[in-house]
Amino acid sequence: MNSIVALTCLLLASVLAVSARPQDASTMLKNTLTSANFTRLVDDLVKFDLADSVSKAGPKTIFAPSNQAFREMMMHNRPMTNNTEIMPKLLRRSFVVNRRIMPDDITNEMVIDTISGDQLRFNIYNTTMTVNGVIMTKEPLVVNNDVVVYRINSVILSSFMKGQNLMVMLEANKDRFSMLIRCIQDTGLTETLTKDGPFTLFAPTNEAFRSLPTEVLARLMASPEEMKRVLTGHVTKGTYFLGALDSKDSGTDSVLPTLDGGSNKIMISGRTIKVDGAPVITSADNIMADNGVIHAISRVLMPN
């Protein structure tokens, strides 16, 4: 009888010891995110074997896509959500290690590194805050000694690395922007778009240039000074993302200063942007650079 009691006590002690053992960092992080209702993010961290690598000891800040963000991604780009090369990289953009970023730490145009090797840019607008153009909560949903978690309304699809300035990114997309690149070079704006900023570049595609009347395009190509005046009207001081400018009401107006000393009145509705009353359809993607962002547009903005 005594041996049975002793064995029972030994087993009970073993169970209690196991239950009292501290949780590993991966489990703690998954529990933290689950309790804040980021269940789809947790599922993907497990699915793509990322839980351990993003849970290393030390402070961290997480920009966590909501469950709705993942559902919308599934609707619009289901193949990407199962891509074992793309999705892990996208998810790792949401994690900043060795740093707890509180709201008071965030300033407009602030840039930080992520564990993916990419960088994130913060922008603060009148009523909205974004990280790489994705709208984020102004206050974190989770704050503890190790982790700060903000909710974002989309998976971060666009990012950049050091040295990837506006000209580098145009060159990377020269199949769409070869005419714009030539015009920038001919007008002496290369250094400005390489070293200065941050800027928002409303970038006319090759088709946009070709849609100009033949005589207008010929005159611009023959006159670098006139072309420069046109191009500087496409460059806005500061980084602006279309979703952020229209985060509250469809048809929000914004007047943005341009390099030529003037301004563009921007009205956005969905993916449609009107610049000084002229409708322009933007591409679906933001092309990030370390000194700003590029929005592809389908027509050249001519000065009044």
Image (cartoon, helix red, strand yellow):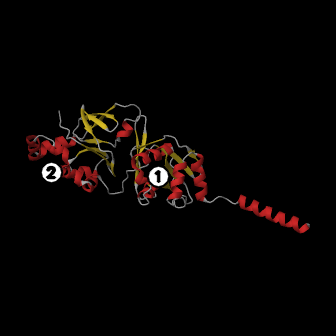
Where 248 falls versus 123 (above or below)? above
**Picture coordinates of residue 231, whole percent (x, y):** 20, 43
Question: Which of the 4 quarters of the picture holds residue 4?
Answer: bottom right
Q: Is residue 218 left or right of residue 106?
A: left
In the picture provided, is 243 more to the left or to the right than 296? right
Q: Secondary structure at mark 1?
A: loop
Q: CA distance from mark 1 to mark 2?
A: 39 Å
- What residue is drawn where x is 23% and y is 51%? 176
Query: Residue 225 versus residue 69: which sits nearer the camera?
Result: 69
Look at label 2 and name its amino acid.
Answer: Asp
Say which element carries label 2: helix
- Residue 13 position, x and y percent, is 79, 62
| Amino acid type shown at disc 1 | Ser
For the residue carrying disc 1, how many other residues have a C-alpha within 10 Å: few (<14), some (14-19), or many (20+)? many
Residue 212, above or below 50: above
Q: Quadrant of the C terminus?
A: top left
Figure check: 164 above or below 231: below
Tell me the residue that label 2 is attached to.
Answer: 186
- CB atoms of marks 1 and 2 within 8 Å: no
Is residue 226 visible in the rendered image? The answer is: yes
Q: Is residue 98 visible?
A: no
Q: Earlier in the sequence, mark 1 or mark 2?
A: 1
Tag 1 residue: 94
Of residues 196 and 239, the one nearer the viewer is: 239
What residue do we see at 11% from left, 47% from top?
221
Residue furthest to the bottom: 3
- Classify residue 117 as left or right of residue 45: left
